[in-house]
Image (cartoon, helix red, strand yellow):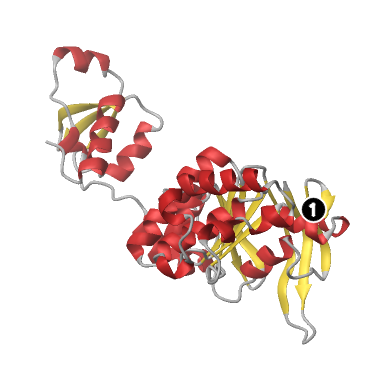
Amino acid sequence: MISFERVTKTYGDGRTAVDGLSFSVQKGEFFVLIGPSGCGKTTVLKMINRLIENSGGQIRIGGRPIGEYKLSELRWNIGYVLQQIALFPHMTIAENIAIVPELKRAPREETAKTVDRLLHMVGLDPNVYRDKRPSELSGGQQQRVGVVRALAADPDILLMDEPFSALDPVTREKLQNDLLELQRSIHKTIVFVTHDMREALKLGDRICVMNEGKIVQLGRPADILNHPANDFVREFLGGELQAAQPRVPALTAGDLAEPITPDNRLASEGAVTIGAETETGELLWHFAAQERLLVRRGDAVVGVLERDKTLKRIAREFEEGGVAK
């Protein structure tokens, strides 16, 4: 859907903001750009809709170089959501959302239906919010309107530049959940800039970690979590990664083992034996290759673990936050 081919951006003072970037974003993908301030992630976002022109390389949308599109055609097919929501204060919510459809000369009745449908989509009752002014809405409600305004012309691509970073944590989490739910129904191609790793892990199908205008690591959230590419990724993301990782219950193989019976001992003949103090994380690695494990305390086998039963017990711990009994 979107491809960068050795793209650079160099300013007149000689500063290079983006240095030979190559990557692709697939149709319908939620693609997250993350990195420290000044790493070039917002520049990358703005080059997609030509708010900033690239200095070298090629950017394509749908296989076509973006320079071949008329600027109006390009931007009408790309929704843009900013941290600063920038709703027009003198307009009603309905008028704010209808701006681009009206510029495209969509029929007024059709536009009114679109406004109501989009407000419903983000949990704002049109009968309540359609005629309000932006100043009458909370920050979270305004940001919802900013998102649906960007969707009003039904663009294929949605660019989002740290849209939730100015909101309080509770509102931010609610809007993240709303955006995920919305994406399940609209299937847009989303390029999302953030500096928050928790947000990136929660939202992204893939995450692109940037530093000094270059890609440091690009992969799925599990790749970033479990296999940081280098010291920069570990140091920059370490604390947030640790906080973002699901809590593994503090259980051992001995806590989880089922008593030995004639039936399960027979079924477990030849099974790998592990120590009773083996912790959950290591236990999961064993289950990647084994269906059953015997648990040893000292020289004696004291129990057996069956993969399906044990994984279900561990899963309950994530949900309940306690220790399995």
Q: Position of residue 224 (x, y in %)?
A: 50, 54
Snapshot quadrant of residue 41: bottom right
- Name the side, left or right, on which 175 lies relative to 313: right
Q: Residue at x 20, y 17 (%)?
A: 265
Q: Position of residue 187 (x, y in %)?
A: 58, 41
Give the residue at mark 1. 60
Mark 1 residue type: Arg
Q: Residue at x 48, y 58 (%)?
A: 131
Q: Position of residue 316 (x, y in %)?
A: 23, 36
Outermost right residue: 68
Secondary element at tag 1: strand
Is residue 76 shown above or below 296?
below
Snapshot quadrant of residue 49: bottom right
Is residue 179 shown above or below 213?
above
Is residue 185 shown above or below 219?
above
Give the position of the C terminus as an image quadrant.
top left
Residue 207 visible in rendering: no
Q: Position of residue 82 (x, y in %)?
A: 57, 66
Residue 120 visible in rendering: yes
Q: Residue at x 45, y 58 (%)?
A: 199
Snapshot quadrant of residue 168: bottom left
Is residue 294 shown above or below 198?
above
- Name the side, left or right, on which 262 lies relative to 33: left
